[in-house]
Image (cartoon, grey):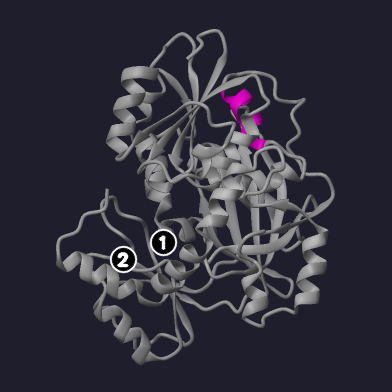
Amino acid sequence: MNETKKKVIIWGVDDYNVLGLCRQFAKSDFELLFIAYRGNANCATVSKYCTNFVEALTIEDGYNYLMTHCANTKDKAVLINSNDLIAEFIDEHSIELKKYFTITGTTKPGTVKKYDDKGAMGKLAEDIGFLVPQTKRCNWNTNISDVKFPCILKPCHQTAGKYNEFKFKVCTTPTQLKNTLRFVRHDSEFLLQQYIPKEKDILIYGARMMDGKTCLAGALIRDRFCGTGESSHGVITANIPKCVNTEHIAQFLERIDYYGLFSVEYGMVKNEAYFFEVNLRNDGTSHFFFQAGANIPLAWAYSSLGLDYSKIKTVVDGDSYYMDEIYDIQNVKEGKISKEQWEKEKSEATVFKYYDKEDLAPYEAMLKIKNRKLFMGSFVAKYRLYIVWFLDKIGFKRK
């Protein structure tokens, strides 16, 4: 890599999160390197802006590549991650990595892993003043006689080498909850939470800069999801809903002494915002906010190097409509919205997940695998608990 230019190293999965980061740094004065965790999946790596990448199938492979080929005490590169396990690894190895890179993380190694646990995260959020759903920790043999239904079951954390049994599971009866717990690992921990009948999701994206300032790009208010399990429509706005207390966000980050990119997710019911989680890494929606006028990752890169970031826009312009241009159409096919409504909303949208008229290859690549991804998403969502149980039985280990 050219030693005269500032450098950004993006370490993550080859997905739309990294694609967005590549586009956000594409026209900046940074040179990019992408370390593709778990290999090349033809999303970010086919972008015209991803001109320099290497594959690292494991986190240890990525770390070894960094320390062997990229470590430089004089001209430190900015290391940005987009994956929870990588974020935890970087934070745990921060003392060594900080010699050669500027990193996202905390001042005390291991803190990110501690607060990636949804139980610890929720407890701190509640102490600060967030509105948190009623919660208790749960494992395979927890007494559930006091549980109110419906309820929601969430893994407390992600474990290297293992697939989580599910992202979340809504249980409407004691029998359904008991049957779910029958198939989970005996060492798995979950949160058993009050079910929130959310009307919309709210996601706040931002960064806590090295000067201690918490910059918020705005809010993504999501009103529709699709067959992949991800949001597919919403509005991005600088006007963060009043039910979200932004001071609580700043206090959370200050309490754990975190610096870097993050997002906070809520479920909105009438005029209340229930805290769901904080993501202590770059969020996959970052390029939505970029398309709406804010470039938080670039501002963070400047801040982490001790440079003036005041001329980089960190707040979005007005309101912009977002649509997943590939998968949202499924809501028409499933009868959730009319074709007329969808066409109207598509014409209003200016923010997209993959599409960029100047960089079409990622959109075209994702369009080719649309049906396969929808089928697999639906299949895995329905049977994941049993698939993971079977993989454990045969001794399968995730890379």
The x and y percentages for residue 58 are: 29, 40
Snapshot quadrant of residue 300: top right
Q: Measured along the vertical axis of the image, is residue 229 above or below residue 72?
A: below
The x and y percentages for residue 171 are: 43, 84
Spatial separation of the CA atoms under disc 2 and disc 1: 9 Å
* Residue 186 seen in the figure: no
Residue 223, numbered circle? none
Q: Does 209 lie within the magenta span?
A: no
- Seen at 77% across and 62% down, the residue is 346
Q: Amino acid at mark 1?
A: Gly
Q: Residues within 10 Å of mark 1 (few under 14, many from 20)?
A: many
The x and y percentages for residue 138 are: 33, 72
Q: Residues within 10 Å of mark 2 (few under 14, many from 20)?
A: many
Looking at the image, is mark 2 or mark 1 earlier in the sequence? 1
Who is closer to the viewer here, 272 or 300?
A: 300
- Type of secondary structure dominating the magenta stretch: helix
Task: Give, as a single range, the part of the protein colored magenta.
Answer: 296-304
The x and y percentages for residue 289 are: 70, 46
Which residue in the protein does label 2 denote?
Answer: 189
Snapshot quadrant of residue 328: bottom right
Instruction: Identify the secondary structure beneath mark 2.
Output: loop
Snapshot quadrant of residue 213: top right
- Seen at 64% across and 43% down, the residue is 360
Who is closer to the viewer here, 54 or 12?
A: 54
Given contact means CB atoms under 8 Å apart, are the residues at marks 2 and 1 in contact? yes
Who is closer to the viewer here, 208 or 316?
A: 316
Who is closer to the viewer here, 394 or 199?
A: 394
Instruction: Identify the secondary structure beneath mark 1.
Output: helix
Q: Amino acid at mark 2?
A: Glu
Is residue 79 toward the left or the right of residue 161 in the image?
Answer: right
Which residue in the protein does label 1 denote?
Answer: 119
Is residue 137 toward the left or the right of residue 266 in the image?
Answer: left
